[in-house]
Image (cartoon, rainbow, N blue to C red):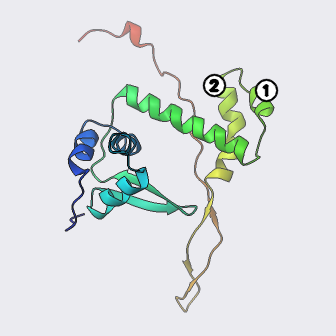
Amino acid sequence: MPSKNTSPYATTFKSAIKRGTPCSVAVNNIATRTKKSPTVIYNSLFKAGLCFRQKFNGQWVYWACDGKKSNATTTKSTQWNMWQCFVDWCIASGHCTPEQLNKHCSSQTQFMNYCKKFWSKQFSTTSGSRKSGKTGRKTGSTTPKSYKFPTAKGRTGNRRFRKAA
């Protein structure tokens, strides 16, 4: 995504992304150091062509153009953050109470199974348009698209007894 604009945050951002730092973490770190809001940083990086964005429920969601897979520690931290935000959303939106969540937390699997019913409510959307019959005109569609709920994956084998090559 070439751009004529430059960003004063480009060098720091590129370096963080190259190390596998998630876009939001990199931007929040830059915002803290520069005492600017993350929105200012994101807009600057977007105009410089260093990240993509998509409007979601009236707010922009950003990700780095050159993002890469991160290490396991960062991945686990990001996954924890996603679940924390999801639980906060479940309670804040009124889909469940803290007591209801607490009744279903004897194991990770039980917790995830309980949360499944809220997942599609959070991530359902309407498609923008579809073509109608013979005329080829686009008409508004309210067909919901739902996203698959993540599942807990167990280990498929016991790595402790793997033979050395």
Which residue does the numbered mark 2 point to in the structure image? 108
Which of the two residues, 45 or 151, is positioned nearer the viewer here?
45
Q: Is residue 13 left or right of residue 155?
A: left
Specify few, some or many for label 1: CA neighbours under 10 Å numbering under 14, 14-19, or 20 or more.
few
Residue at (56, 64) in percent of width and height: 58
Residue at (61, 41) in percent of width and height: 86
Which residue does the numbered mark 1 point to in the structure image? 103
**Residue 26's spot in the image, x, y percent?**
34, 42
Q: How far apart are marks 1 and 2 (CA)?
A: 12 Å
Q: Which amino acid does label 2 sit on?
A: Gln
Q: Quadrant of the C terminus?
A: top left
Q: Is residue 98 left or right of residue 5?
A: right
**Residue 139's spot in the image, x, y percent?**
59, 83
Residue at (76, 33) in percent of width and height: 98
The quadrant holding residue 125 is bottom right
Q: Which amino acid does label 1 sit on?
A: Lys
The answer to whether 73 is drawn above or below residue 24 in the figure is: above
Residue at (23, 53) in percent of width and height: 8
Secondary structure under the numbered disc 1 in the rendered image: helix
